[in-house]
């Protein structure tokens, strides 16, 4: 039985039924699962992120952005450690003129007086207009979204809930920024109309290369089963045509892809293959030469039981680490992503890789700020005002910013 028996019936429904609960009139009301990020919504959010990024470059643009949501307040309720998600949401709020406050240590809140987490969140909704929450409890954000829906149904105050990382389950805003990074990378500057075409020159070496997320081989390396970022991103990528996914994991049941995710991906038409080293071969060719996008992850030791800790500690992790030699085998355009933090002791990505042009992880983290700002613009329905400001300040850029899907 879950910790939320009153919501158990809702939690037991199919993923599609649960996603429906978080929509209103074709828009997001809450963001709880990666599966809510449809290709159409991603295109809209990426276009907004591009506009925000461009406007933020100058003083007048920044003033326009700060004027979008100056009447809104956000609660950052992060009871699990975070650097990037917390700070990029805070920066996104600041960009848009949203005032934020935070609860990071529940020992400093009335939870120490046995106030329930759901009561705490309902209290936040009295003072704030959106609640962005990270918790070690897989279902807490989902349950809080149902609670807000119940309040809405009885005409009481109800605010959007954003899942900023739930247990080892889901991290949908990480999937959003990962997709923003992937789509920007696989745009190959085509929407900027730059000439000569970068895609054209790459196609001389890789004739099958196309723009967009479709027709690609994605590799996920490291701790897959407990990696909520992998689950959310793989779910989103499964919507695109002709996608192959490699899962490269140490030989341990706590790390390999689980049957649920594998079945979800295969049902969506993804070709799934598993490997136990970055040096393995697929159909006679080294996998490193076939990968279009490599997503590295760290082994998440915080989820280890004492027994698992000892078992995983005895595994040789060198087949799951990048090196200059391994990166040299990869395609010249293939981005290397990592949700970060990376493990400074294990060193799954040694710092010597950081200067390689394919190392995208710092840019990926910065993209989180633009992508999360775009999400807030969508949730508060100020897309029109954003577009107006963008047209006013960057009329020449409008054609490329509103170009069709990067799929
Ligand atoms: N990628 C990510 O979620 O980082 P933080 O844990 O630092 O927020």
Image (tube, grey):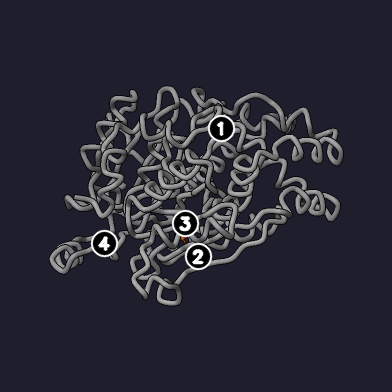
Q: Which residue is mark 3?
A: 122
| Residues under numbered marks 1 and 4 in contact, where contact means CB atoms less than 8 Å apart | no
Mark closer to the observer (3, 4): 3
Above or below 47: residue 172:
below
- Front one among 45 and 190: 45
Looking at the image, is mark 4 or mark 2 earlier in the sequence? 2
- Mark 2 C-beta to ligand 1 under 8 Å: yes
Looking at the image, is mark 1 or mark 2 earlier in the sequence? 1
On the question of residue 132 being in view, the answer is yes
Above or below 384: residue 172:
below
Q: Which residue is mark 1?
A: 27
Mark closer to the observer (3, 2): 3
Looking at the image, is mark 3 or mark 4 earlier in the sequence? 3
Which numbered circle lies on residue 303? 4
Above or below 9: residue 116:
below
Q: Residues within 10 Å of mark 3 (few under 14, many from 20)?
A: many
On the question of residue 284 being in view, the answer is no
Task: Residue at 36% x, 49% y: name it.
Answer: 228
Left or right of 181 in this view: 389: right
Q: Residues within 10 Å of mark 4 (few under 14, many from 20)?
A: few
Looking at the image, is mark 1 or mark 4 earlier in the sequence? 1
Left or right of 292 in this view: 267: left
Mark pair 1, 2: CA separation = 29 Å
Residue 281: x and y in percent read: 27, 37
Mark pair 1, 4: CA separation = 35 Å
Residue 3: x and y in percent read: 26, 55
Q: Which residue is mark 2?
A: 83
Q: Residues within 10 Å of mark 1 (few under 14, many from 20)?
A: few
Q: What element does badge 1 sit on?
A: strand
Looking at the image, is mark 3 or mark 2 earlier in the sequence? 2
| Residues under numbered marks 1 and 3 in contact, where contact means CB atoms less than 8 Å apart | no
């Amino acid at each position: 039985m879950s910790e939320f028996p009153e919501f158990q019936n809702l939690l037991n429904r199919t993923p599609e039924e649960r996603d429906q609960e978080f929509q209103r009139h074709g828009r997001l009301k809450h963001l709880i699962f990666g599966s809510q990020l449809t290709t159409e919504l991603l295109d809209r959010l990426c276009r907004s992120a591009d506009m925000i990024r461009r406007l933020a470059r100058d003083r007048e643009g920044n003033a326009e952005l700060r004027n979008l949501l100056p009447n809104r307040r956000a609660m950052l309720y992060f009871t699990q450690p975070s650097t990037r998600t917390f700070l990029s949401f805070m920066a996104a709020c600041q960009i848009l003129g949203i005032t934020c406050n935070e609860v990071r240590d529940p020992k400093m809140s009335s939870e120490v007086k046995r106030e329930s987490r759901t009561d705490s969140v309902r209290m936040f909704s009295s003072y704030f207009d959106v609640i962005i929450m990270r918790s070690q409890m897989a279902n807490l954000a989902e349950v809080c979204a149902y609670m807000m829906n119940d309040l809405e149904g009885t005409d009481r105050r109800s605010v959007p809930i954003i899942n900023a990382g739930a247990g080892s389950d889901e991290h949908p805003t990480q999937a959003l920024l990962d997709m923003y990074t992937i789509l920007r990378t696989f745009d190959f500057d085509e929407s900027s109309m730059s000439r000569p075409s970068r895609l054209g020159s790459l196609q001389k070496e890789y004739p099958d290369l196309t723009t967009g997320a479709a027709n690609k081989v994605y590799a996920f390396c490291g701790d897959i089963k407990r990696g909520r970022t992998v689950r959310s991103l793989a779910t989103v990528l499964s919507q695109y045509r002709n996608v192959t996914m490699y899962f490269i994991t140490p030989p341990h049941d706590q790390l390999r892809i689980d049957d649920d995710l594998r079945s979800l991906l295969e049902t969506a038409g993804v070709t799934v293959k598993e490997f136990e080293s970055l040096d393995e071969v697929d159909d006679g060719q080294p996998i490193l030469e076939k990968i279009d996008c490599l997503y590295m992850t760290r082994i998440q030791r915080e989820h280890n039981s004492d027994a698992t800790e000892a078992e995983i500690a005895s595994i040789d992790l060198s087949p799951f680490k990048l090196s200059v030699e391994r990166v040299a085998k990869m395609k010249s355009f293939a981005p290397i992503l990592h949700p970060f933090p990376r493990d400074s002791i294990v060193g799954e990505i040694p710092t010597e890789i950081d200067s390689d042009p394919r190392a995208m992880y710092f840019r990926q983290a910065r993209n989180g700020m633009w992508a999360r700002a775009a999400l807030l613009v969508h949730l508060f329905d100020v897309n029109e005002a954003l577009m107006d400001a963008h047209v006013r300040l960057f009329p020449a850029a409008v054609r490329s910013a509103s170009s069709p899907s990067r799929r």
